[in-house]
Amino acid sequence: MPTLVMKFGGTSVANLDRIRRAAKRVGVEVAKGYDVIVIVSAMSGKTNELVGWVNETSPLFDAREYDAVVSSGENVTAGLMALTLQEMNVPARSWQGWQVPLKTTSAHSQARIEEIGTENINAKFGEGMRVAVVAGFQGISDEGRITTLGRGGSDTTAVAFAAAFGAERCDIYTDVDGVYTTDPRICQKARKLDRISFEEMLELASLGAKVLQTRSVELAMRYKVKLRVLSSFEEQSDEAGTLVCDEDEIMESNVVAGVAYSRDEAQMTLRSVADRPGIASVIFGTLSDAGVNVDMIVQDISEDGRTNMTFSLPIDQVGRADKAMDAIKGEELNYTEVVTDSEVAKVSVVGIGMRSQSGVAAKMFKVLSDEGINIKVITTSEIKISVLVDRKYMELAVQALHDAFELDKAA
Ligand code: ADP
Ligand code: ASP
Ligand code: MG
C-alpha cells in the first residue's frame, strides 16, 4: 500500500480534543488506502517546561540527561495518539525513537539522523497495522543513549521517515495554513505561498523562520521528498497548504520570496585586537571549540596594527563566548575589552531572483534608512541579504521590507 507521513506539531496535539481532531484526519487518509506514519511533537509548551526543569536542576547539565528529560514529551503524545486511533477502530501502534530504531550521532541535543530501521514497522504493517505513530525529535546513539535532534526536530523526523519509507508525501500539519512571505504573526500583510523552492525555504528556515526545521528542508531536498506544510485546524483539500518543491516547478516568483527574522541574537566586539596573520583563526577557532555558533563577522580597518573584531552569536551562548575569549585574552590577542550588545536581531530577505537581479541590497538599505533603522552588520550570499539591527526595530524592519518589496502581491 502507498505510504503517507503526517506530522503534527505541538499546537496540533495540545490537548486530547486536538489529538482526536488530528486522529480523524489520519483516519481519512487510512480510509483512502494509505498506510500512515504519524510523527508527533510534544504538547505545546511541554518541551519548554522540560528544558526549564533541566536548567533549574543543573545549570551546567549533562547533555545525555538533558536529552533523557526533554525527549519525554513526545512519548506521551505518541501513546495517546495510538490510543485515540484504536478508539476509532484504526489499527495503530506507537514507537519511541529507540524502538524504531532511529539511529543518530551522539551529539546530544543536536544529534543528526544516521539511519532509520524500517524492518520493525514494516513487519507490523504486514500484520495489518495501518498507522505507526512515532515520537518525533528523538533517537538513539551508538552508545545506546537517547538523543534529540535540536528544537523543532520533529519536522526532521518526519522528512527522514518519508525518505526511508518512500512515502508518497510528507505533510507537516501546524498552526498556520502554510509557508508565508514572512511570519504572519508579526506582519498582517504576509501572504501564503502556494509553492516555495527548497533553496528559498532552506534559507528562510536557517535565518529564523521556524515553520520548518532547517535540517528537514535539507533532507527533503536531498532525498526528493514531496513536502507540504498545512493547517491542522482547517478543512483540507489536496491543494491546501504550501508545497516545498524544486525551483523549476514554480512558474512565476518575486525577486524576493520572503523576509525572515531571528530575535535572539547578540553581538560581541573585541576592541583593539593585535592585527596580524592568524588572529581570526585564533578567535574563531577558540569560539568554535567552545561550541559557539558564530554567524556574522566584521573586521574594521586596522590602525597602528590594531583592529576591532565584531561577530554575532545566539544570545544564550554569550556566557560561553565570554569565557572562551577571556581564556585567550592575555597570551595571544591582547584586546582591550569585550563589548557585548544583547539587544539585537537579524532580519533577512531571501529570494532566488537575486541571482539575476541587482539592486536588492541597495533597496533594502534605503528602506531601513528611511525608517531611521541603523544597520550594525551586513552579510550577503547569492540568494539572501541579512542585517543586524536593534531588536526594538525588528518588527518595523520586517514590515517595512515586506511593504517595499510588495510581497503581499503575487508575481
Ligand atoms: P509546530 O509546533 O507545528 O512545529 P512551530 O511553532 O514550530 O509549529 O512553527 C509554526 C510557526 O512558525 C507559526 O506559528 C509562525 O508563527 C512561525 N513562522 C515563522 N515564519 C513563518 C513563515 N514564513 N510562514 C509561516 N509561519 C512562520
Ligand atoms: N517538541 C520539540 C520542540 O519543541 C520538537 C518539535 O516540536 O519539533 O522543540
Ligand atoms: Mg516546529
Image (cartoon, grey):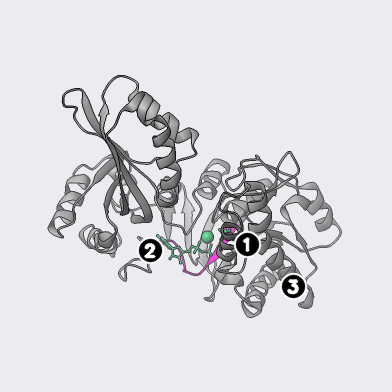
- Residue matched to label 2: 183
Residue displayed at 51% across by 44% down: 218
Q: Ligand 1 near label 2 (Cβ, under 8 Å)?
A: yes
Circles 3 and 2, Cβ within 8 Å, touching? The answer is no
Amino acid carrying mark 3 in the image? Leu
- Residue matched to label 3: 85
Q: Position of residue 99 (x, y in %)?
A: 78, 52
Quarter the N terminus occupies? bottom right
Q: Earlier in the sequence, mark 3 or mark 2?
A: 3
Amino acid carrying mark 2 in the image? Asp
Residue displayed at 38% across by 41% down: 295
Give the magenta range: 170-180
- Residue matched to label 1: 6
The reply, left or right, for residue 283 in relation to residue 156 is left
Residue displayed at 56% across by 53% down: 59
Mark 3 to mark 2 CA distance (whole Å)? 33 Å
Q: Residue furthest bottom?
A: 17
Q: Position of residue 256 (x, y in %)?
A: 29, 52
Q: Residue furthest left?
A: 370
Q: Is residue 252 magenta?
A: no
| Residue 391, picture quadrant | bottom left
Q: Indicate which label's residue lies in the foreground, 1 or 2.
A: 2
Circles 1 and 3, Cβ within 8 Å, touching? The answer is no
- Ligand 2 located in image quadrant: bottom right
Give whichever of 356, 277 is nearer the camera.
277
